Amino acid sequence: MLVRMTTNADGPQVRPRRRAPAGAAVLREDVTEAIRAAVFEELATVGYARMSIEGIARRAGVGKTAVYRRWRSKLHLVLDIVSVIAVQGLPAPETGSLEGDLRMLYEVSSRALRHPVASQIIPDLQAEAARNPEIAEALQTALKQGQEEVALKIVAAAEQRGEVRAGLNEELALDLISGPLYWRSVVIRSPKLPKGYLGALARATTEAIKAL
């Protein structure tokens, strides 16, 4: 029987390791993660249209077979990648105030959106989404789902604290929270945010949501 050593508060523990079924293909997680990382780099470097399984495999240091054992095409590989992004989401801030929560959200989101890799990948996939409904759907989920989940928690917490009225228009609140930073960082791709921009944006958004 295969075993593995783990450690917890009580010291080293011996646990059985689950054996793969006879004849089953064993997909190493480290190889899978290396391929995913290579996809991000390829997308940022050459874009979706020029990206190839050969290039991904070469960058990941694996054979093409390793890629095809996990994904049957580059489309399915990219769909998987953007789905992973959606699942990861963002942590919900808990500063005790609506403005504080928004400020923290904007700081985290700004760093993510302005990362060199993300700033190259997102516009490229948006252009590809105009021609590919599957990518359009996956990208919408990746960009919207995680952000919405956090924003709704921020608004719900503000309602519980009595900072905003109960039953406000959540869709409009979400647009107010997510729209301005996305517009500046991704659409017009401003090279640098003005000094104090995130704080001013958090204050303005707070007042706008309170007015709903």
Image (spheres, rainbow, N blue to C red):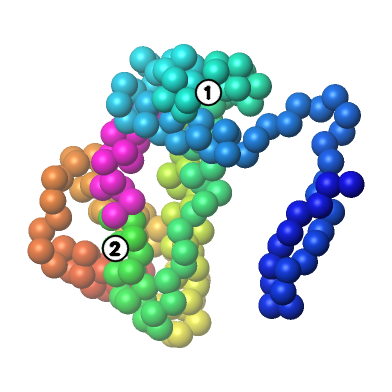
Count of numbered circles on the image? 2
**Quadrant the C terminus occupies:** bottom left
> Residue at label 1?
62
Question: Relative to 22, is 108 on the left or the right?
Answer: left
- Magenta part of the protein: which range? 111-125
Residue 107: give its label. 2
In the image, residue 62 sits, relative to residue 95, either above or below, namely: above
Q: Taking 60 as reference, is 197 above or below it?
A: below
Label 2 vs label 1, nearer the camera: 1
Q: Amino acid at mark 1?
A: Val
Would residue 197 appear left or right of 107 to someone viewing this image? Answer: left
Mark 2 → mark 1, Cα distance in angstroms: 36 Å
Mark nearer the N terminus (2 vs 1):
1
Q: Is residue 120 magenta?
A: yes
Amino acid type shown at disc 2: Glu
Q: Which mark is residue 44?
A: none
Question: In the image shown, does 63 or 192 lie closer to the viewer?
Answer: 63
Left/right placement of residue 4 relative to residue 208 reads right
Q: Is residue 140 magenta?
A: no
Residue 154 lies in what quarter of the image? Answer: bottom left
- Tag 1, which secondary structure? loop
Q: Is residue 151 visible?
A: yes
The residue drawn where x is 28% and y is 46% is 115
Is the stretch drawn in magenta largely helix, strand or loop? helix
Q: Is residue 75 among what the camera can see?
A: no
Q: Dot 1: within a 10 Å radius of its alpha carbon, few (fewer than 14), some, or many (20 or more) residues? A: some
Residue drawn at x 89%, y 47% as measured from the top left: 1
